[in-house]
Image (tube, helix red, strand yellow):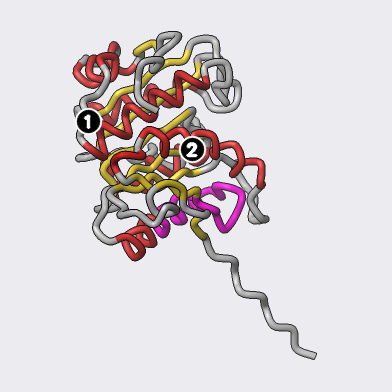
Amino acid sequence: MVQQALPERGARLGRPKGAAAAQETVHGVVLLLPGGPETGTGRPSRLSVAAVLPLARRLVRAGRAEGLTAHVVHYRHRGWNDTAADPAADAEWAVDEVIRRYGDVPVCLVGHGMGARAALRAAGHDAVVSVVALAPWLPTAESAVEPEPVKQLVGRQVLIAHGTNDQRADPELSYRLAERAKKANRDVCRFEVHADGHGMHHHRSEVQALAADFLLGSLFDHRFSRPVEDALAAPPPLGLRMPLAAGFGSTLPG
C-alpha cells in the first residue's frame, strides 16, 4: 500500500480584532509575530500565540478610532530553522494576505523574540511602513553565516525595545543591529527597559504604551510622544539607548 505524504501546513492569520471584526472599514493593519525556539518543525506552541494577545488588544484599543485591525500570525513551524528563516517567510505571506483581504492598507509588523527578528526581516515588503521589534532574538557573530540584513529597513520607521537583563536574547546584539540600521535609515530608535528580562513583564504597561504610541504615529500620522521623537532625532548611542521611563504612556489614549 502506497502511503501519501500529508500536505504541509500553511501559515494563517488569527481571527481579526478591531475594525474588521466589527465589520468596519479597515485603514491599517498590525500583524503580531509570536516568539519561538531557534529550531523546530513541529506545530507552534499555543502559549507563544497567547503571549502576544494582550499586546494585540492594547494596540486595537489605541487604534479604534483609526480603523485599525490586528491579526496574530500562526506560523507553519515553531522554530526559525537556520537559513530557512521560516517565520520571516510566514510574515511576508501574512502581509500579502492582508493586502488580498483589505486592499492597499499600511501594515505595521510587531514581533517578540524570534517574531521580532521575523518582523525586521520581512520589513522590505512594499506594504510595510513600520516595525516594532520587542526583545529581538538575533544570532551571535560566531553563529551567523553573514551579518543580519538591515537594507530592508530603509524607508521604514523602526522601534526596538529590549530589557537590559534579558538572558534569552542578548540586548547588546539588538543595539549593534540598530546601530547599523541607523546608518542607512534615520527613522530608527531603540529603548532600553532597565532591569527587565526577555518578556519585559515588570514594565509591561510601559512597553505596550510605547508600542501603541509608535504604531499610531507610523500608521496614522499621529504625533509621536516626546520620548519617541527625541529617540528618533538623537544620534547614536543616545537614540539607541533611550531609557523607557516608569509610567510611560499613562496619559496616552487606549
- Where residue 120 sits, quadrant-wise, is top left
Up the image or down, 209 lies above or below 5; here it is above
Which one is nearer the viewer's eye here, 215 or 134? 215
Seen in the picture, residue 65 relative to 167 is either above or below; the reply is below
Residue that label 1 marks = 222
Answer with left or right where residue 237 lies relative to residue 196: left
Element on which disc 1 rests: loop
Q: Nearer the viewer, residue 19 or 247?
A: 19
**Is 13 situated left or right of 234 in this image?**
right
Between 133 and 63, the residue placed more toward the observer is 63
Image coordinates for residue 106, horizontal then vertical, percent: 27, 48
Question: On the image, which quarter does residue 217 sit in?
Answer: top left
Residue that appears at 50% across and 18% down: 163
Residue 17, given in percent of the width and then of the height, sits at 46, 48
**Which residue occupies 56% across, 20% down?**
166
Q: Amino acid at mark 1?
A: His
Say how many tags the image has.
2
Q: Is residue 201 above or below residue 64?
A: above
Range shown magenta: 73-94
Q: Position of residue 29 (x, y in %)?
A: 35, 48
The residue under label 2 is 57
Q: Is residue 133 visible?
A: yes
Instruction: Determine the image quadrant of residue 216.
Output: top left
* Residue 35 x %, y %: 56, 39
